[in-house]
Amino acid sequence: MNDCIFCKIVAKQIPSKLEYEDDLCMAFHDINPRAKTHLLIIPKKHIETMKEIGVEDEALLGRMMKVASDLAKKFDLNDYRLLISTGKGAGQEVFHVHLHLLSAPV
Ligand code: AMP
Ligand code: ZN
């Protein structure tokens, strides 16, 4: 087991406010929300950044986007942003790919 905090959430070794889970991904509330609704959609598989995405991950990324769209509906969001920070310079802090779903206006 690596030291990745999101892998620990996937393994249920640390708690999260879970909103969704399936065979490929999970969605939970960001611990430090930057909008009224701020969810993170993550792959269960450990992938450090978007730079490591391979052709085998196409279905996984599609699933994450669909889950984000479904959760936006569930939370009644009309306007929202989907964001994946990639690399330290872009503000990535957790090196396990995650899609931010942020309600707007923040
Ligand atoms: P990023 O800057 O794109 O890497 O975003 C990492 C996000 O993960 C930040 O918004 C953090 O607030 C969030 N985060 C870090 N640890 C946890 C945790 N244990 N549970 C939920 N969200 C977390
Ligand atoms: Zn991980």
Image (cartoon, grey):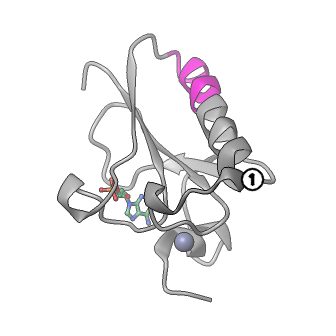
Question: x and y percent of residue 81 in the render?
Answer: 37, 27
Which picture quadrant has residue 79? top left
- Mark 1: which amino acid? Leu
As drawn, the residue found furthest toward the front would be: 55
- Residue 5 in the image: state x and y as whole percent: 48, 74
Label 1 Cα crowd, 10 Å radius (few <14 / some 14-19 / many 20+): some
In the rendered image, which quarter is residue 56 located in?
Answer: bottom right
Q: Residue furthest bottom?
A: 1
Is the residue 17 above or below the residue 6 in the image? above
Q: Could you tell me which residue is drawn at 65 percent across and 51 percent down?
A: 26
Question: In the rendered structure, does residue 71 fall within the stretch colored magenta?
Answer: yes
Which region is colored magenta?
68-76
Residue furthest to the left: 89
Mark 1 falls on what kind of element? loop
Q: Residue at x 30, y 59 (%)?
A: 92
- The quarter of the picture where the C terminus appears is top left
Q: Residue furthest top?
A: 78
Q: Position of residue 93 (x, y in %)?
A: 30, 65
Residue 50 in the image, given as x and y percentages of width and height: 46, 55
Instruction: Give the quarter of the figure containing the N terminus.
Output: bottom right
17 displayed left or right of 106? right
Location of ligand 1 given as a quarter of the image: bottom left
Q: Which residue is mark 1?
A: 24
Q: Return the residue nearer the eye: 102 or 84.
A: 84
Asked whether residue 20 is in view, the answer is no
